[in-house]
Amino acid sequence: QVQFVESGGDLVQPGGSLRLSCAASGIIFSILRMGWYRKVPGKQRELVAAITINGSTNYADSVKGRFTISRDNDESTVDLQMNSLKPEDTAVYYCNAVRPTMGPRYDSWGQGTQVTVSS
């Protein structure tokens, strides 16, 4: 059974930092590209960062230079370090494996973790 458990979200002031973590189970983590998505009410879920099995990364233009994705294949975890946070980063953040098309691989989503950037 595929399962993703996200954590680390919080209320933070603009310019602040957060580190999100996702634990995956029920998948062969080490062979999959992994990613962080975010969802704002009324908008489609968007991919913000992805990391391949050998550590190559790519980012949405809106987060380049501010967010860093990393993974631990031994622990089946993927983290997202978020710096210089902006109010427009406010969203529920989810992880999932990522298809070559950059869409989510699995229909099963975790509960997500809420990030709120506000003064």
Image (cartoon, grey):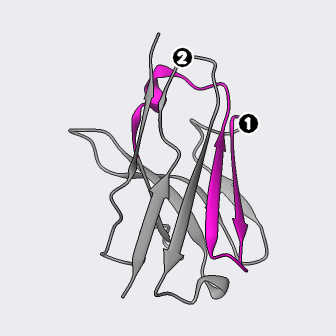
- The crowding category of the residue bearing disc 2, from other C-alpha atoms within 10 Å (few below 14, some 14 to 19, many at least 20), is some
The disc label shown at residue 85, or none: none
Instruction: List the residue tagged with mark 2.
Output: 13
Q: Which residue is mark 1?
A: 65
**Nearer the observer, 88 or 16:** 16
Q: Could you say which quadrant of the image residue 116 lies in? A: top left
Of 18 and 42, which appears nearest the observer?
18
Q: Secondary structure at mark 1?
A: loop
Please indicate whether residue 41 sits to the left or right of residue 4 in the image. left
- Looking at the rendering, the stretch of residues picked out in magenta corresponds to 66-92
Residue 115 in which image quadrant: top left
Q: Which kind of residue does numbered mark 2 sit on? A: Gln
Spot occupied by residue 33 in the image (x, y as percentages of width and height)? 61, 75
- Label 1: how many Cα within 10 Å (few below 14, some 14–19, many 20+): few
Examine the rendered structure and indicate whether residue 88 appears above or below residue 92. above
Task: Please provide percent x and percent y for residue 85.
Answer: 59, 26
Q: Quadrant of residue 62?
A: top right
Q: Residue at x 64, y 30 (%)?
A: 17
